Image (spheres, rainbow, N blue to C red):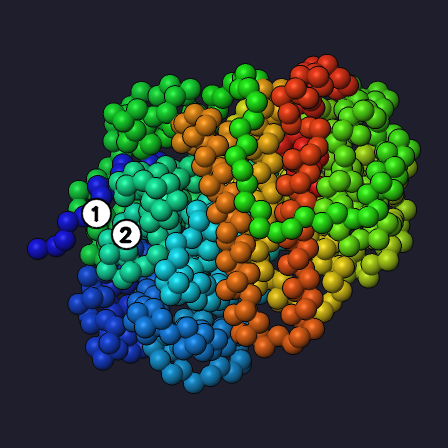
């Protein structure tokens, strides 16, 4: 008798019908023979033929790729047989015994079986079924695809393989990840980005390489991945957590983080799954058309991208249908059909127990994202005590930086209205003094000399001014076209070669041109290009905020966390910190999982603490929708104090993750890479920069005249929009200091 299920499966949001490829039986026969030929069945110690037949990966692929030919379906099915065999083989060979050294040696060999060349490339002699299968599949697949696709798909495969070490480390330590860390890492180890690459192949829908890294395409891929993984977590909880001792499961993550029962955690995972699917729809319908126009894609390219999006939809529906039928998962009592449409709940309240399932399944819960009314009276911000294990240090050049920042802002025209631009008088001298951006810079760069500290202060002043300027000038009127034109002109203020920028039309352009000249001229051409792209990321994120504001849409929680880093200007300030370290740290070290985890957890700590401090300012005075506390309120349908508790817990979790990676991840990275002392010393210095960054941002929030209830009331009626504070989207990012934190 099978064990009792640990929870009742929730009611799923299923907006697209599943369809079955008619060539399913041919794929079954082929994949069985292929798996036997690769040594994956009898004698492998992992599967018998009966196991493969019961899992029925041909049925999975027939549901997820309903329109491809018989030959393509057979090849795609072989890929899935391989990836599931790898997963089970890895569990038996390394996870149960916690053999990290053996696992790393095993994984290090696999990229050699994916050479970038389409023919004539030598590969090692396979030693096991996983290597044999990968070599065969790569040779059969890549001739039909471009070099760009081969590069992207190989990287997704490596990520899927390598991040298995992250899972192994967490099991060995008995550690359950925090929700943000889990979503990020699950994308890699879960394999859905890899599946998205196979959608391009199976649907003859290869994405043009020039837009593959654009926000709309990345969001489609990531929302697809998150939904696939969260769905799998619900169906596989019993097998992974109870049988295998697995800790990388979304239900367990939320059970631990929220301190709730398994059933409630499962419902919350389903809520997040629904939100990610709805973000997919939102992006496909609102962002892809703009991408087609802005990048001037040809009709054929547009058709391929549309076919790719449709292929990802097919995968979602088909994957759910397969989970209902596969013996690999718990699926007792799961319903294949969507429930009847239910009445929409009151958007101001949380979902009632009686309508929660139907409301989720029909998408009615998304109404809360559009039904928020701005300028609600909320009272003083609730700010719990925040964890800060690192000592604050301040630069001795603070007074000089304060004086020169005020003088620079006055010379650039930042403290006055821009001629002919309504709403542009967002700052005056009193506000600038009160914001005290050099105090933030002093904490971020305590060892800077006077020139370095002044330049850092000016970048913070310019970025914060721009973040206030965009909602005041473009947000009130919904002028997205004007904001895009402004971005285009700002990019011209940062020439890469010997070109001369156009004469500045306003203070924002004048300030950027001056800062670019002072910062970028000493850089090498490659450094200058990279630095310019980091500023572009921030400018594009301001447009994302304006777009949400125009649609009156509170963001999806995962999209908010990830874009909040961009509105912070984090890439830019991160790169400036790296430049101070020279080139002692190789690019592959900066791109490694542990270093990215340190950076992301530090950024999220800063963003979320700003959201706690700025809640009253943004919600009551500015009518803002980009605040993490509000996002949590909207997603869970809960009140302000409860949302504060969740955001505070997440802030603490991100800090603890930073500490954990520093303690356990970096030593392993040094060992794995055989890093010399020079590299270790430089990276240790960069870690100290991140620690200073977090301590400096917290200190700024605690001491700046910006967020207190009395100060907000006094500032009401100053320059800019009614209510005193600059209104709109841009104010979410650091109201100065938050931006500074980047």
State whether residue 693 appears in this view: no
Look at the numbered discs 1 and 2 and tell me whether their residues touch, using CB distance below 8 Å. Answer: yes
Q: Where does the image place residue 244, in percent across and percent down from the top left? A: 27, 62
Q: Secondary structure at mark 1?
A: loop
| Quadrant assignment, res 484 | top right
Q: Which residue is label 2 attached to?
A: 237
Q: Which residue is label 1 attached to?
A: 6
Q: Image quadrant for the C terminus?
A: top right
Tell me: 593 left or right of 458: left
Q: Secondary structure at mark 2?
A: helix
Count of labels shown?
Answer: 2
State whether residue 733 appears in this view: yes
Q: Nearer the viewer, residue 299 or 353?
A: 353
Q: Is residue 719 above or below residue 534?
A: above
- Residue at 71% over, 28% down: 705
What is the number of the mark on residue 643? none
Q: Image quadrant for the N terminus?
A: bottom left
Count residues near mark 2 (Cα–Cα under 10 Å), then give few for <14, some for 14-19, many for 20+.
Answer: many
Count residues near mark 1 (Cα–Cα under 10 Å), then give few for <14, some for 14-19, many for 20+.
Answer: few
Q: Nearer the viewer, residue 611 or 307?
A: 611
Q: Nearer the viewer, residue 170 or 324?
A: 170
Tell me: 494 left or right of 601: right
């Amino acid at each position: 008798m099978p064990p009792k299920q640990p929870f009742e499966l929730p009611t799923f949001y299923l907006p697209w019908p599943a369809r079955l490829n008619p060539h399913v039986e041919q794929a079954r026969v082929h994949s069985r023979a292929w798996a036997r030929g690769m040594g994956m069945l009898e004698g492998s110690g992992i599967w018998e033929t009966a196991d493969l037949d019961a899992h029925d990966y041909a049925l999975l692929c027939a549901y997820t790729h309903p329109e491809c030919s018989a030959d393509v379906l057979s090849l795609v099915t072989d890929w899935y047989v391989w990836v599931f065999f790898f997963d089970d083989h890895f569990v038996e060979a390394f996870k149960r015994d916690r053999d990290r050294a053996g696992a790393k040696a095993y994984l290090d060999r696999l990229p050699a079986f994916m050479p970038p060349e389409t023919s004539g490339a030598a590969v090692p002699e396979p030693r096991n079924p996983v290597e044999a299968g990968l070599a065969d599949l790569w040779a059969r697949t890549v001739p039909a695809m471009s070099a760009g696709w081969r590069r992207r798909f190989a990287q997704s495969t490596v990520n899927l393989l390598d991040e298995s070490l992250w899972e192994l480390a967490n099991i060995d330590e008995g550690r359950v990840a925090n929700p943000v860390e889990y979503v990020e890492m699950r994308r890699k180890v879960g394999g859905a980005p890899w599946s998205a690459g196979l959608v391009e192949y199976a649907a003859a829908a290869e994405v043009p390489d020039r837009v593959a890294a654009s926000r709309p395409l990345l969001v489609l891929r990531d929302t697809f991945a998150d939904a696939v993984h969260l769905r799998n977590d619900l169906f596989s909880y019993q097998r992974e957590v109870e049988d295998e001792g697995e800790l990388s499961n979304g239900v367990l993550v939320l059970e631990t983080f929220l301190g709730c029962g398994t059933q409630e955690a499962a419902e919350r995972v389903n809520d997040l799954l629904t939100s990610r699917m709805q973000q997919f729809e939102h992006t496909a319908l609102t962002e892809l058309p703009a991408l087609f126009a802005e990048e001037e894609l040809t009709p054929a390219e547009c058709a391929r991208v549309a076919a790719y999006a449709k292929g990802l939809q097919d995968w979602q529906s088909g994957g759910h249908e397969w989970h209902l039928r596969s013996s690999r998962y718990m699926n007792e009592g799961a319903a294949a059909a969507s429930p009847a449409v239910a009445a929409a709940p009151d958007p101001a309240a949380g979902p009632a127990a009686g309508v929660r399932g139907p409301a989720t399944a029909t998408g009615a819960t998304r109404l809360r994202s559009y039904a928020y009314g701005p300028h609600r009276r909320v009272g003083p911000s609730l700010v719990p005590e925040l964890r800060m294990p690192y000592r604050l240090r301040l630069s001795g050049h603070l007074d000089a930086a304060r004086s020169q920042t005020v003088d620079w802002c006055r010379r650039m025209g930042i403290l006055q209205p821009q001629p002919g631009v309504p709403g542009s008088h967002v700052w005056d001298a009193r506000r600038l003094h009160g914001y005290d951006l050099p105090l933030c810079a002093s904490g971020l760069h305590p060892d800077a000399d006077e020139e370095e500290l002044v330049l850092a202060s000016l970048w913070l002043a310019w970025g914060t001014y721009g973040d206030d300027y965009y909602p005041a000038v473009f947000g009130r009127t919904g002028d997205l076209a004007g904001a895009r034109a402004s971005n285009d002109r700002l990019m011209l203020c940062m020439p890469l070669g010997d070109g001369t920028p156009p004469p500045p039309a306003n203070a924002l352009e004048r300030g950027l041109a001056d800062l670019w000249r002072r910062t970028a001229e000493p850089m090498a051409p490659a450094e200058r290009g990279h630095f310019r792209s980091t500023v572009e990321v921030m400018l594009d994120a301001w447009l994302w905020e304006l777009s949400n504001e125009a649609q009156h849409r509170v963001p999806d929680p995962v999209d908010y966390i990830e874009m909040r880093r961009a509105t912070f200007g984090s890439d830019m300030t991160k790169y400036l910190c790296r430049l101070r370290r020279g080139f002692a740290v190789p690019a592959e070290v900066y791109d490694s999982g542990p270093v990215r985890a340190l950076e992301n957890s530090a950024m999220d700590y800063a963003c979320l603490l700003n959201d706690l401090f700025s809640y009253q300012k943004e919600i009551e005075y500015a009518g803002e929708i980009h605040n993490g506390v509000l996002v949590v309120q909207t997603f869970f349908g809960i009140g302000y104090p409860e949302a504060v508790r969740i955001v505070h817990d997440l802030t603490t979790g991100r800090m603890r993750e930073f500490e954990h990676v520093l303690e356990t991840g970096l030593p392993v990275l040094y060992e794995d890479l055989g890093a010399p002392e020079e590299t270790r010393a430089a990276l240790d210095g960069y870690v100290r920069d991140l620690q200073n960054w977090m301590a400096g941002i917290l200190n700024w929030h605690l001491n700046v005249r910006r967020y207190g209830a009395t100060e907000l009331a006094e500032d009401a009626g100053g320059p800019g929009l009614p209510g005193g504070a600059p209104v709109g989207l841009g104010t979410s990012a650091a109201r100065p200091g938050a931006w500074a934190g980047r």
